[in-house]
Image (tube, rainbow, N blue to C red):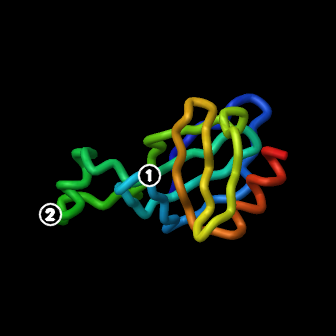
């Protein structure tokens, strides 16, 4: 399950689970929700106090992935295809990913 709010006029295009991303020497497997306005990076909240109770079999609840980082589609400066796909942002930062479908969908949105 996922827990995020949409902006006015925003629609979910697709959700990608177990997506590899990299920035410099940092790598992570994460979930990315692509909307017509944003990229939402999501993962389980490791600081959720209910998680300790769930592990200890004290309660049972539905775990949800929470947004930990957002990128507006308008902030994407360029998309480059190399060995991986590289997104360059307007603030001069970039990150890499390796999913063909996400790349094609982003190309359509960015233009």
Quadrant of the image occupied by residue 72: top right
Q: Residue at x 77, y 58 (%)?
A: 105
For residue 54, which numbered disc appears in the image? none
Q: Nearer the viewer, mark 2 or mark 1?
A: 1
Residue bearing the label numbered 1: 23
When the figure is inspected, residue 77 is found, relative to residue 103, above or below; the finding is above
Q: CA distance from mark 2 to mark 1?
A: 35 Å
Q: Residue at x 66, y 33 (%)?
A: 75
Is 87 left or right of 21, judged from the image as shown? right
Q: Residue at x 55, y 61 (%)?
A: 97
Secondary element type, mark 2: loop
55 or 4, which lies in front? 4
Is 108 left or right of 12, judged from the image as shown? right
* N-terminal label among 2 and 1: 1
100 or 50, which lies in front? 100
Secondary element type, mark 1: strand
Residue bearing the label numbered 2: 56
Quadrant of the image occupied by residue 58: bottom left
Q: Residues within 10 Å of mark 2 (few under 14, many from 20)?
A: few
Is 49 left or right of 68, judged from the image as shown? left
Residue 109, position as x, y percentages in the image: 80, 47
Residue 94, position as x, y percentages in the image: 54, 45
Q: Residue at x 69, y 38 (%)?
A: 77
Residue 40, position as x, y percentages in the image: 57, 45
Residue sitting at the far front: 82
Residue 91, position as x, y percentages in the image: 56, 30
């Amino acid at each position: 399950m996922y827990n995020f709010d949409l902006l006015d006029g925003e629609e979910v295009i697709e959700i990608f689970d177990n997506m590899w991303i990299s920035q410099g020497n940092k790598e992570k497997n994460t979930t990315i929700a692509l909307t017509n306005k944003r990229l939402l990076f999501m993962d389980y909240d490791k600081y959720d106090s209910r998680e300790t109770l769930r592990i200890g079999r004290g309660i049972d609840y539905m775990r949800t992935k929470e947004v930990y980082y957002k990128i507006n589609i308008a902030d994407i400066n360029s998309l480059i295809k190399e060995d991986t796909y590289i997104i360059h942002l307007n603030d001069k930062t970039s990150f890499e990913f390796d999913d063909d479908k996400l790349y094609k969908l982003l190309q359509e949105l960015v233009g």
